[in-house]
Image (tube, grey):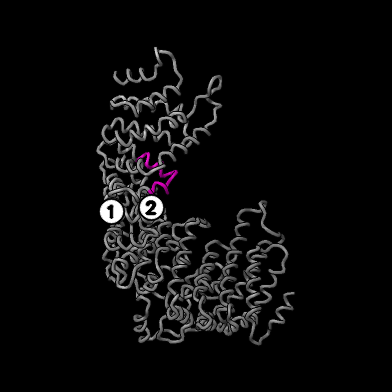
């Protein structure tokens, strides 16, 4: 009753005469600073709160100074007045609210513009942040015992961070006695979920793009609080709360070297166990990865949570040094997750992208146990495959796709599947950065020692690269040849003084190769590729266009071709033939049409895109090969490469602009580096292309 009587006495005029809303707001505002009774000030705040919806501008312009005074003096003392005061200030500072719905005499509220309310929201917010005193008090109230005082303080702080983040961050850093840090951590450690969840969202805004605050919170105990929340919510099996906590953890670590160093020394070993991966399992460990890690049940939220953890692990994987066991365990975890688990494709992409170049050097010696889904089991049943090296798994992933194409819908084109194969190709490129490894892979494509086992990666790439372009074209075949071109290009992306291109010119894919002797079998086990890899060999060059890429190449593999001299054909000559054959097949598939149009069938239009993709792979590889290599340019031109390029360049229609541009680029490279005498010289090339 006291509240109603006080409100009535404040709103009625002298002798009960009616008064305007402006007069009432003025009287209520005066009572905030003049009244000595807490109950009177509480009643005034509650009355002003009720007027904010319709009279936001007037209440803020007149009463905001008094409300800030109440915030500084009374909120800590009385929980009710604190809740009402904080809610009123929050309503005054909101942007785009429904304030000022009064329209004046004869003016309906529906036609009143809300621009004034938006402007007043910015103005009130700037007034509140004019000095640091009110913000410091707001941070102090985060540690208050009253629930609603803490919750309303957190809501107002989140609103200020949303619109004036840099100002609030500056006041947070200057807060005395660390009241900001203690308040935020008190919210994170609170048992009430509504406070803790709201605190996680506020923490993300507070630490955004501010390294200093990230350091303050990290060394103040934020890592412990966040990891405790993740554990309490069920780890990666948790819901959105775990996602918010992991996002906060990522923001504290990313682009902050000092926080990364501190986290590596104190909390990093606790991350791999969240994925059921032992922190003691390093790259050099002989123990196998637990099956419960490799085969798990997945849902959308778990995929998001694991993706965030993988992103954090990638930060420490790239910064690992030699002899760092926990860094080695992180790298092993990422490799196993990408190559030997049933995790979603998007997570595998992040895992491969998180691997550093130093970890790629261990791919050849690391033995993994991959799994593949049982066909038509909808992912409920899995087969454990034979042990293999991580390098072979990377090459298989790039050439064949995830699980070797098992379970994929034919001709499906999901973007994430291509991203995974591209990440595998990038991982292989990191592996062959060292010249000795690169040369070993190239020598394995043309072994001369009967006692030497060719590395399986060499055979895999050569097999795909020498497979003739199929007719009719399929998405699977075009992508396989495209990525095999990318992998071989990475072997040639070297300094001019390197021997890589010289080794590539001597590759004779279909020459008869001696079988291994007993001594050779023994040497095979001592190669830098793991013994678990069983050698595979390329298909016969004379196999049908749709032949299996896994057909063997052994003694007499070139016999089906019917040309003994063709066994001495170099890889470069084979690529020129395949490029010319691809142009021929493409022209036949679109004979009589200039470019694909909407009137053409979707399957026909896609066939042309598949041919363009395959041709682009050949051209990109040849450009890389011809660059600064006169001997290769001479061989290319002497084997009809010039005519193969000029025909699509001179064709006015029917050729994709990208393909035509690549042909022109390759022709320019040949013109620049055509420096050896041969059938075609630079002058003849210039005259021919006119």
Question: Looking at the image, is 465 positioned above or below residue 183?
Answer: below
Specify the segment rendered in magenta. Answer: 154-170
Q: Secondary structure at mark 1?
A: helix
Residue in the picture at 60% in, 73% down: 578
Tally of numbered tags: 2
Q: Is residue 10 left or right of residue 475?
A: left
In which quadrant of the rendered view does residue 676 lie? bottom right
Quarter in which the N terminus is drawn = top left
Q: Which residue is mark 2?
A: 303
Residue in the picture at 41% in, 16% down: 13
Q: Which residue is mark 1?
A: 220
- Image depth: mark 2 or mark 1 in front: 1
Q: Is residue 93 left or right of residue 224?
A: right
Answer whether residue 296 is magenta in the image: no
Sequence-wise, the earlier of marks 2 and 1 is 1
Report the residue that reaches farthest toward the front. Answer: 34
């Amino acid at each position: 009753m006291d509240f109603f009587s006080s409100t009535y006495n404040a709103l009625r005029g002298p002798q009960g005469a009616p008064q305007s809303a402006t007069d009432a707001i003025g009287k209520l505002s005066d009572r905030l600073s003049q009244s000595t009774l807490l109950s009177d000030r509480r009643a005034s705040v509650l009355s002003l709160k009720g007027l904010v919806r319709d009279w936001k501008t007037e209440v803020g312009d007149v009463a905001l100074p008094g409300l800030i005074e109440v915030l500084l003096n009374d909120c800590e003392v009385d929980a009710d007045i604190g809740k009402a005061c904080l809610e009123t200030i929050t309503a005054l500072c909101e942007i785009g609210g429904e304030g000022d719905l009064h329209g004046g005499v004869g003016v309906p509220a529906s036609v009143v513009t809300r621009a004034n309310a938006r402007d007043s929201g910015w103005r009130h917010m700037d007034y509140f942040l004019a000095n640091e005193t009110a913000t410091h008090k707001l941070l102090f109230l985060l540690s208050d015992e009253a629930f609603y005082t803490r919750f309303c303080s957190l809501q107002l702080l989140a609103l200020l961070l949303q619109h004036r983040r840099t100002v609030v961050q500056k006041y947070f850093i200057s807060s005395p006695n660390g009241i900001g840090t203690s308040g935020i951590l008190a919210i994170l450690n609170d048992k009430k979920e509504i406070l803790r969840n709201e605190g996680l969202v506020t923490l993300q805004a507070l630490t955004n793009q501010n390294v200093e605050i990230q350091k303050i919170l990290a060394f103040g105990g934020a890592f412990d609080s966040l990891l405790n929340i993740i554990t309490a919510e069920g780890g990666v099996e948790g819901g959105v709360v775990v996602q918010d906590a992991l996002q906060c953890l990522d923001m504290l670590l990313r682009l902050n070297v000092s926080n990364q160093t501190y986290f590596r020394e104190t909390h990093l070993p606790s991350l791999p166990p969240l994925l059921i991966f032992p922190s003691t399992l390093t790259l050099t460990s002989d123990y196998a990865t637990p099956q419960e890690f490799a085969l798990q049940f997945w849902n959308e939220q778990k995929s998001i949570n694991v993706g965030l953890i993988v992103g954090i692990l990638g930060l420490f994987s790239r910064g690992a040094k030699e002899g760092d066991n926990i860094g080695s365990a992180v790298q092993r975890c990422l490799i196993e997750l990408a190559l030997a688990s049933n995790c979603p494709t998007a997570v595998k992409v992040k895992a491969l992208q998180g691997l550093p170049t130093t970890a790629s050097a261990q791919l050849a010696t690391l033995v993994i146990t991959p799994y593949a889904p049982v066909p038509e089991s909808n992912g409920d049943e899995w087969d454990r495959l034979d042990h293999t090296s991580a390098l072979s798994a990377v090459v298989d992933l790039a050439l064949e796709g995830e699980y070797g194409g098992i379970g994929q819908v034919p001709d499906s084109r999901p973007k994430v599947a291509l991203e995974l194969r591209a990440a595998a190709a990038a991982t292989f490129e990191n592996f062959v950065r060292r010249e000795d490894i690169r040369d070993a892979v190239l020598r394995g494509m043309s072994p001369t020692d009967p006692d030497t086992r060719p590395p399986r990666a060499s055979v895999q790439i050569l097999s795909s690269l020498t497979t003739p372009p199929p007719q009719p074209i399929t998405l699977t075949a075009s992508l396989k040849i495209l990525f095999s071109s990318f992998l071989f290009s990475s072997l040639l992306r070297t300094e001019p003084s390197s021997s890589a291109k010289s080794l590539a010119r001597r590759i004779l894919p279909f020459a008869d190769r001696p079988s291994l002797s007993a001594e050779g079998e023994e040497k095979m086990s001592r190669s830098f590729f793991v013994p678990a890899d069983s050698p595979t060999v390329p298909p016969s060059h004379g196999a049908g266009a749709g032949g299996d890429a896994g057909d063997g190449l052994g003694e007499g593999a070139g016999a089906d071709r019917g040309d003994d001299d063709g066994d001495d054909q170099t890889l470069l000559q084979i690529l020129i033939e395949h490029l010319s054959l691809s142009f021929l097949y493409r022209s036949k598939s679109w004979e009589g049409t200039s470019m694909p149009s909407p009137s053409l069938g979707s399957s026909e239009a896609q066939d042309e895109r598949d041919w363009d993709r395959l041709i682009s792979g050949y051209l990109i590889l040849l450009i890389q090969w011809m660059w600064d290599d006169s001997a290769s340019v001479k061989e290319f031109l002497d084997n009809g490469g010039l005519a193969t390029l000029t025909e699509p360049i001179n064709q006015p229609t029917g050729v994709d602009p990208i393909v035509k541009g690549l042909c022109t680029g390759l022709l320019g490279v040949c013109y620049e580096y055509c420096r050896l005498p041969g059938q075609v010289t630079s002058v003849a090339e210039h005259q021919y292309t006119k």
